[in-house]
Amino acid sequence: MISDSRCSAPNGSKYKFKSSHLVPESSSAGARCLHARTMDDLQTIKAKLKSLADLNFTSQQDLSIEYYLIINAILTNFAGQELITGLTMYINAVLDHNISLVLARELITHFCCNLDTVEHNVSKQVTKHTYSRLQPREKGYEEQVSLIRQHLATIYEHERNWQKAIEILKGIPLDNGHRQFTLDYKLGTYLKLSRFYLEDNNVLESEAYINRAALLQVDSKNETLQLEFKVGYARLLDCRHRFIEAAQRYSDLASSEIISIDERYAALRNAITCTMLSPPGKQRSRLLASLCKDERTHSMEVFSILQKMHLERLIRRCEMEVLEINLKPHQRMILAHNCTICEHALIQHNLIAASRVYKNITFTGMGELLEIDADRAERIAGQMISDELLSGIIDQPDNVLYFDDPETLLPEWDVQVKATCDQVNHIIELMTKNNLLPEMVTIKMEMDF
């Protein structure tokens, strides 16, 4: 089974890390230095690699030690183009020489682990060359090809070449390969693909891979991957404009102790933004109250707007500029009637705020209050009433919006309850008059009175 740690030493020999490179523990420090000094030019490296092909080693361990000394010398003595040439010669020798498949796999695994220690340009060229050599024989080197793909995807990620990163990472046969991958390895790969698709603005594919990851993360004990899943899912909800759900996820991350203070602060800012962009409702009101109580928000520039939204006070459009400056591209999307998400959220909030101040208002007055035209104000109010976000009645002949006062609803309810009780009493009286009530019920009624 393939695990997350693939830089272990070959079978049958002890190795340790020194200067970021694996070297055989069986060779002395003096011998390692001697090898490094005597292999300080490419011709010597080439000759040494050729001699290994010609010599007959009775022990695979002795042969592996020689190869490890050569790779250590290349990584120690060369840089730039010479390092590219040296590493290319090494990988060609390992794949071309008549050595056992088991040893070749071990040497290439160690080689892949050392690619992280060289500079970006060198790593990219050598990784692409190694991948081109291994791809035709992928069935024999499935684990090593997966390592190369992961490393190459990381390189493309640093270059923000998301499509290349996706293409190379999707080639790993997680479900139908000859080797079995660990749950955490699959989970990490699915999360990477989801993130890459999201960066490439392909939300549907991103959601497909986050859903695959969701099935695996339940059984994972890896806290890092669990956290990565939570962040990825929150970002996906944000990009899908499911702002209230994203805000709740960001809020949970903002109070997590396993991430840094800066990351918690960033999550808190995202929670505030998503809460402000979400439509009115009980969940939004609870989040606004929670965010206002959080002392970290008091020093933020958006706190005054946050507080007004919580207290359901009217907000002028110019006040929202503080929020709009930090909006992400997907949060700046233009909706119908040439209205941004932020503007629409502001209008909805101000309608709720107006309902706390006015019992009724004309559409002309409401348009002036919301800084939009009267027809648009009527359409938005009608939609909010239809979606049960606003309690009110529209009088179209008079062009007036009547807000329902929650305090007037209780007396009306009391009247209906009283009317129902009166009807029940009337029925009981009729049944009593006609001797239709059971004897036990009559006795119980007399006892109650």
Image: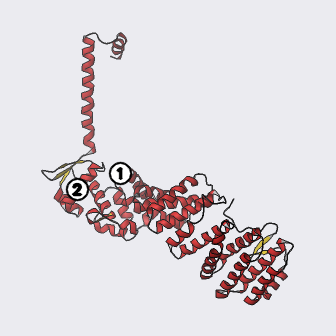
Q: Position of residue 121 (x, y in %)?
A: 59, 82
Q: Residue furthest right?
A: 58
| In the displayed structure image, the side of residue 246 where residue 133 appears, left or right | right
| In the displayed structure image, the side of residue 174 where residue 19 appears, left or right | right
Q: Position of residue 146 (x, y in %)?
A: 63, 67
Identify which residue is drawn at 27% across, 47% down.
Answer: 391
Of marks 1 and 2, which one's residue comes earlier in the chain?
Answer: 1
Measure how far apart labels 1 and 2 are at the Cα level. Answer: 19 Å
- Residue type at mark 2 is Arg
Q: Which residue is mark 1?
A: 281
Image quarter for residue 437? top left
Note whether residue 327 is visible. no
Secondary structure beneath dot 1 equals: loop
| In the displayed structure image, the side of residue 414 where residue 158 appears, left or right | right
Identify which residue is drawn at 51% across, 59% down.
Answer: 209
Say if 130 sits above or below 215 in the image.
below
Q: Which residue is mark 2?
A: 379
Image quarter for residue 414? top left
Say if 208 sits above or below 410 in the image.
below
Image quarter for residue 377? bottom left
Q: Quadrant of the C terminus?
A: top left
Q: Quadrant of the N terminus?
A: bottom right
Here the colouring is secondary structure
Q: Residue furthest left?
A: 397
Towards the viewer: 60 or 3: 60
Q: Position of residue 84 (x, y in %)?
A: 65, 84
Towards the viewer: 6 or 348: 6
Judge the density around disc 1: few (<14), some (14-19), many (≥20) Cα neighbours within 10 Å.
Answer: few
- Residue type at mark 1 is Gly
Secondary structure beneath dot 2 equals: helix
Towards the viewer: 428 or 11: 11
